[in-house]
Image (tube, rainbow, N blue to C red):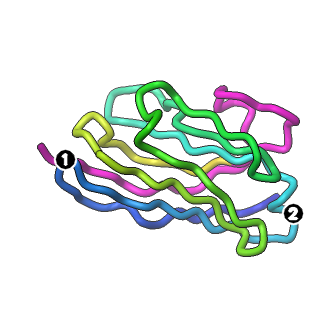
Amino acid sequence: QVQLVESGGGLVQAGGSLRLSCAASGRTFSSYFMAWFRQAPGKEREFVASISRGGTNTYYVDSVKGRFTISRDNVKNTVYLQMNSLKPEDTAHYYCAGSRTLVPGTNPNRYDAWGQGTQVTVSS
């Protein structure tokens, strides 16, 4: 099973940008369907974006479409989340997750590898 470590979070003003990275250990990264989730205080963990094993197919929650871009580099064993036009409501702890399920979708219970997360705070 891969080990995941996120980085790139921080404090940014509304309208700004951040790029999150998730580095995976192990030689099986390319076999994992990858996703980003987020969790704000007092709220449930929310799906943000996902990317297929080869990087061809991506999927986003409606609230981030057109602003966020997920990508992956299977040589560097890294998945990214480019976040533009950030809003205060994007403030949350962001988690990288991986799944060996063929198409795990947006259900966090179908993801079996998780990082510790990185905090993103957007000020108004």
Q: Which residues are magenta?
A: 98-124
Q: Amino acid at mark 2?
A: Thr
Query: Left or right: where does residue 112 sit relative to residue 5?
Result: right
Residue 119 magenta-highlighted = yes
Query: Left or right: where does residue 4 sit relative to residue 75?
Result: left
Q: Amino acid at mark 1?
A: Ala
Please name the residue shown 52% across and 28% down the image. Answer: 61
Q: Secondary structure at mark 1?
A: loop
Q: Indicate the quadrant where residue 42 lies.
A: top left
Q: Residue furthest left?
A: 124
Mark nearer the N terminus (1 vs 2): 1
x, y percentage for residue 107? 66, 26
Q: Mark 1 highlights which residue?
A: 14
Depth check: give the residue in front, 63 or 112.
Answer: 63
Q: Mark 2 highlights which residue?
A: 28
The quarter of the picture where the N terminus appears is bottom right
Please name the residue shown 49% across and 30% down the image. Answer: 46
x, y percentage for residue 47? 55, 32
Residue 106 magenta-highlighted = yes
